[in-house]
Amino acid sequence: MPPGGGGPMKDCEYSQISTHSSSPMESPHKKKKIAARRKWEVFPGRNKFFCNGRIMMARQTGVFYLTLILILVTSGLFFAFDCPYLAVNITPAIPVVGGILFFFVMGTLLRTSFSDPGVLPRATPDEAADLERQIDIANGTSSGGYRPPPRTKEVIINGQTVKLKYCFTCKIFRPPRASHCSLCDNCVERFDHHCPWVGNCVGKRNYRFFYMFILSLSFLTVFIFAFVIAHVILRSQQTGFLNALKDSPASVLEAVVCFFSVWSIVGLSGFHTYLISSNQTTNEDIKGSWSNKRGKENYNPYSYGNIFTNCCVALCGPISPSLIDRRGYIQPDTPQPAAPSNGITMYGATQSQSDMCDQDQCIQSTKFVLQAAATPLLQSEPSLTSEELHMPGKPGLGTPCASLTLGQPTPPSSMPNLATEATLSDIMPLKDEHGGHQFLTPDEAPSPPRMLGTGSPLTHSRTMHMLGLASQDSLHEDSVRGLVKLSSV
């Protein structure tokens, strides 16, 4: 080691590069810890859920709150201002009957609004694909030219042909009497209609509660309106009509609300009484599905032919369970692998993304080797001074390594030295198709003429230095050429 050369060479020690985090085999089987989620949290329809999925409503609930306010305010005014006078002057049974009707109305309203109307679950991707294959097979067996796949099926119910329509949203053939609600975006079994006043669809599972709600509300409205008029008449007999209105202004408000709402509520109750007695739905009646105008042989196949039986089936029959299981837990089909911490997408990525990552790694590795090959020698190798060997246009071998810029990557300590017996191909491995250049080992390289003597003790070392300096340009050119080819893959 020449004196004075230890200082600059000590600054050039290689630092160890940790490649532990970038290993692609570290986290292939790590799974994400996914908290158990309930089905209502990922429900595809346009619904709102409360109380951990126990309450199910439509998204448009503004009119429902108006219904609650009208019922609560009108009933509250009646019990606060009219019932005390009526209980003293007529009978104490009036507040009792009014209270029973009020609680029955509120119970049936909340039961209708907060329950599942009979939503049909949507088809899974596998079920939808199988159904599409069945449709394609049925279409392929048809004779003649091309026909679009049939989207209806025909079934016979009590001698009547009923068409089953295909729902493009739910990917199912809807069962008889089912329809898709455009507001809730669900197929509802035995769909009657979407009622904004209750904030929910009316279907198979909540129709009886809806009917009992409007029927009991009709009785409550008539009850309140009748006894409010009785209250005003009794007061007017004592103090006069104007004084009676001044003494009980709440009675005037109740009478106005009941007068304008009783006609629609009573009419709606009568209409649904007719539908129940004939075992029809609002949707079927509006469309005229079983009207005689469509033909003499057209009749309702769901009617039992008896009004009493139809009413018992609609109001007293068993309630079918919910088909969507909105409070059930989601069962994951396949484990989800965790993403690697180094930012390289491995599992779950597309092939193109993996290829791009491989190309980036190859480019970065080649750049790293180029920079490592261009760095000066280790301090353990004896160096030549600029007086002993100097080439025009090149820095001398005694140039200190401190000239390297900060932040330049350095190869790990385990990398072979340029001055050892290792070949240059061990430092920068290249594919055969990316370069056909042959590099000589230090033993095979001849000594430059007129530079070193044959018997010199530094022949081997100086030959290696000459090889490194003379081949820097060709090495850089060949490596860049290979880098361009790698980046074009």
Image: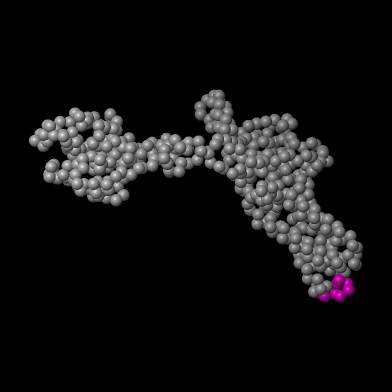
Question: Residue reaching furthest left?
Answer: 450
Which of the image's four quarters has the C terminus? Answer: top left
State left or right for residue 397 relative to residue 84: left
Would residue 293 be seen by someone viewing this image from the given angle?
no
Asked if 407 appears above or below 19 in the picture, the reply is below
Q: Position of residue 100 (x, y in %)?
A: 83, 56
Residue 433 counted in the magenta span: no
What is the chief secondary structure element of the magenta stretch? helix
Q: Give the number of callouts.
A: 0
Q: How is the image coloured?
A: one colour
Question: At 55% across and 29% down in the image, what residue appears?
Answer: 133
Q: Nearer the viewer, residue 243 or 407?
A: 407
Asked if 58 appears above or below 414 in the picture, the reply is below
Question: At 48% across and 41% down in the image, what residue appears?
Answer: 339
Magenta range is 235-243
Residue 241 counted in the magenta span: yes
Q: Position of residue 213 (x, y in %)?
A: 77, 51
Q: Position of residue 308 (x, y in %)?
A: 83, 41
Question: At 72% across and 32% down in the image, what residue appears?
Answer: 157
Q: Nearer the viewer, residue 341 or 120?
A: 341
Which of the image's four quarters has the N terminus? Answer: top left
Q: Quadrant of residue 239?
A: bottom right
Q: Position of residue 411 (x, y in %)?
A: 31, 41
Asked if 342 appears above or below 231 in the picture, the reply is above
State left or right for residue 146 relative to residue 438: right
Asked if 202 appears above or below 99 in the picture, the reply is above
Question: At 79% across and 36% down in the image, what residue appears?
Answer: 304
Q: Nearer the viewer, residue 453 or 333?
A: 453
Would residue 54 be seen by someone viewing this image from the given angle?
yes
Q: Nearer the viewer, residue 70 or 365?
A: 365
